[in-house]
Image (cartoon, rainbow, N blue to C red):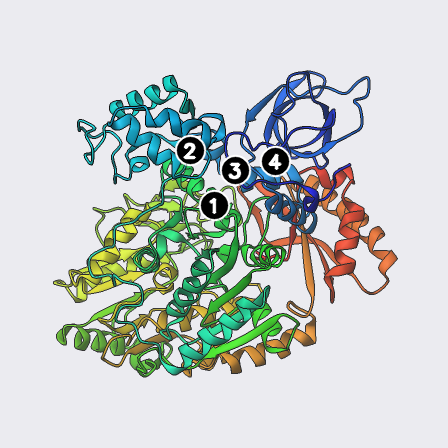
Amino acid sequence: MQTDGDDIEGAGWFGKGPEAAPVATGRVVEVALERGIDRVLDYAVPPGFDGKVAVGVRVKVPLGRGNTPASGYVTALTDRGPGPKTKSVLEVDDKRVLIPADLLWLARWIGDYYFCPLGTVLGSVIPAAVKKQTGMKRRWMVRLAGGGGLEAVSPLLATMRAGAAKRLGQRLLGLEKKWHLLDGELMGEEGGEGRGGGGGEGGEVSSATLLTAAKALVKKGVAELSKQDETEADVKPVRHKPALGDVGAMNEGVELNPQQREAVERLGTSLRGGFSVSLLLGVTGSGKTEVYLRLIEQVVAAGKQAIVLVPEISLTPQTVRRFTTRFPNVAVLHSGLTDTQRHQQWQAIGRGVANVVIGARSAIFAPVPNLGLVVVDEEHETTYKQDQAPRYHARDVAIMRAQKAGAGVVLGSATPSLESYQKASSGVKGWHLIHLTERARKQPMPKIELVDMKDPLVRKRGGIQLISPRLEVALKGTLAAGKQAIILLNRRGYSNFVYCARCKQPVHCKYCDVTLTYHRGPNEQADALVGGTLQCHYCLGQQTLKPNCEVCSSKLVLFGLGTQRVEEELTSKFPDLKFARVDSDTMRTSRDYEERLSEFSAGRLQVLLGTQMLAKGHDFPGVTLVGVISADTALSLPDFRSGERTFSLLTQVAGRAGRGDDTGTVVVQTFNPEEPVIQSALSHDYVTFADDELQTRQRVGHPPFGRMVRFIIRDQELPAAQRLGADVADLVHAAAKEYGDTIQVIGPHPCAINRIAGYHRQSVELRGPDSRPIQTMLRALRGQPLLQRHESVVVDVDPVNLL
């Protein structure tokens, strides 16, 4: 029985053509259902389905007593006969091999490691647009008769008169012996499909003329003609028009500095040696992207493909354009694509005509046929961890996929995750650390100034003002010099705390144990509270704000800060300022975001105000000032990673300043100027910060020196959640006894945010110094019915968020 992805005879994501589907040799197939059943089920192959049912094909099968049709994926073909009660496959959803052998192997690893049913993993690997065959068309395909017997068809072709038919036949004689899409490119014409033209010698050929010519060849016995799904056709390369101002030719005008050259040489050597993981630790502005481009050039030249992961594709249009202007055939996968576009991009990737794939975390599943390199840019970003099943981390999945393919991995960041830095710096086998300590054009790092918001000189001005005198002066000077600024506050809305002046009680969300954030309406007066809304940033619920307390009718008071409030202050202090607020309230789509960035890049905006969206990967030479309204927003969170995230955010946003010819300045406002994390950010010294933080984590056994698994239990009734939490804890404690002190069980206890979206939450944690015993224990627990209640019990392996 086939049980391992290594044994699967794969033919690529779309196969090698219309006839390449593997033939079913057994009478029973194993199917992993998308519905989330944590085991594969046996189904019989009915008569007439041989050649259609293959490993990696999506099928419909009957499920349960009612034989409800359910979708799943064939994971193995077996030689054993069906039993008397074995049900049969109902139909083949898609005759394409959607899951090739390497992705099936990867899905099995993800399911095993992240405690997730294989069918759920496979269902997330393939985009919905591909499953639904969105935009798929039927296209005419042509090939030489009999698969291309040249000796037989050449004499027949010689008897034909000159014209489009003979030209088509001669073209087919010189091409590979397979099916070809019947369009103008087949005749050597660019974009010939659908154009006019008489089909004379050397002229453009219309679709109608081509079809007539092909039918003439069929009549003569020279060719075969077939109408087939577009996905079986030769998919055209993906081409992107460069944006204005982008660099055109490959490497034109870009000269590497000595550190970049050394990095390219070392990384290139690692790539040629097969699988390796290299951490490219480079200060902001050190030219990491240029290093990626040079490495990808080597990979493409070797006939292989590269996958480039970015934290969020809609946030990095500059990065995407840099790749699309340097490589002709690039596929971009992001949420802004239509379903048809996503399907077309997926086809191009699977057929190997896209040599570079750029996308967010799910792009790691792109069906590249010959993977040579995976780049994980800004690898520290928590957005690489999926928060729904399967709860995989794209960085770790990228490493496993590259290891299976014998490819290289480059992790890039100015502030790497401590997990990656510890491995690369401590000499873990196969890991390398490459450090870029200076900016690409040797510009100085920006000067960081701290402003103590507790200082009486700052607070003496009347009222609550979010922009300190120092930041106000710096902003005036920047604008007077004709330069630009970025102002960061990682908290959206107007006020994150609304409370009653008499009761002293904050206004909470009805469904979550968090306070509501006040969002001011567009036409609301500064001294009024009517017209805005209270929003919950967890369950997304909202309600109209009433100016008085519902209990005692006293006046409600706003406290705290948000980007709307800073926007109001900027408008008041700089009435002629051309600026835009950039947060998830104003940027509804990726197009909104790119339009604002384009305006800023063109100089039509002087200031960008926003949340952490502005800290990621942007390169604006005109920015000489960065202001951080509050450096303390994440420090008080009950999560051991809060210090790491604060350092990363401050360092990343500070790096947006001074990338041009002028030195940058960063003004950081804080109520905790002596906080070690904030002090570390002053010197741009990641290594010192990381070494100190790693020592602390090692003392308490936190990752990367310990592994962690969370069981999150949810129920709408608190007593039920507590009972279920206790049951899960008893089950886990009993399983952990076998491992002595190797595995520590903590809980059950309420989560830091006890209730979200109406569900009370309890947590049970597994901790241990090594993942092996934890994984062995999880496998033993796999079949327990208590842990199969997917709506009530969530298993999160290697969690990045402990709230």
**Can residue 463 be seen in this snapshot?**
no
Between residue 137 and residue 559, name the one nearer to us: 137
Task: Give coordinates of residue 65: x percent, y percent.
Answer: 72, 17
Q: Distance between the residues labelled 2 and 4?
A: 20 Å
Q: Disc 1 vs disc 2: which is toward the camera?
A: 2
Q: Disc 1 vs disc 3: which is toward the camera?
A: 3
Q: Mark 3 points at which residue?
A: 16
Q: Mark 1 points at which residue?
A: 509
Q: Disc 4 vs disc 3: which is toward the camera?
A: 3
Name the kind of residue labelled 4 in the image. Gly
Q: How far apart are marks 1 and 4 (CA)?
A: 46 Å
**Can residue 515 be seen in this snapshot?**
yes
State the residue at coordinates (38%, 46%): 534
Between residue 439 and residue 137, name the one nearer to us: 137
Q: Are marks 2 and 4 in contact (CB under 8 Å)?
A: no
Category of crowding for the residue at label 3, using alpha-carbon neighbours closer than 10 angstroms: few (below 14), some (14–19), many (at least 20): some
Q: Mark 2 points at which residue?
A: 233
- The label shown at residue 617 is none
Q: How far apart are marks 1 and 3 (CA)?
A: 55 Å
Q: Distance between the residues labelled 4 and 3?
A: 14 Å
State the residue at coordinates (23%, 59%): 568
- The label shown at residue 56 is 4
Q: Earlier in the sequence, mark 2 or mark 3?
A: 3
Category of crowding for the residue at label 4, using alpha-carbon neighbours closer than 10 angstroms: few (below 14), some (14–19), many (at least 20): many
Q: Disc 1 vs disc 4: which is toward the camera?
A: 4
For this view, does 800 lie left or right of residue 454?
A: right
Q: How far apart are marks 2 and 3 (CA)?
A: 10 Å
Task: Give coordinates of residue 600: x percent, y percent.
Answer: 21, 61
Q: Which quadrant would the N terminus be assigned to in this image? A: top right
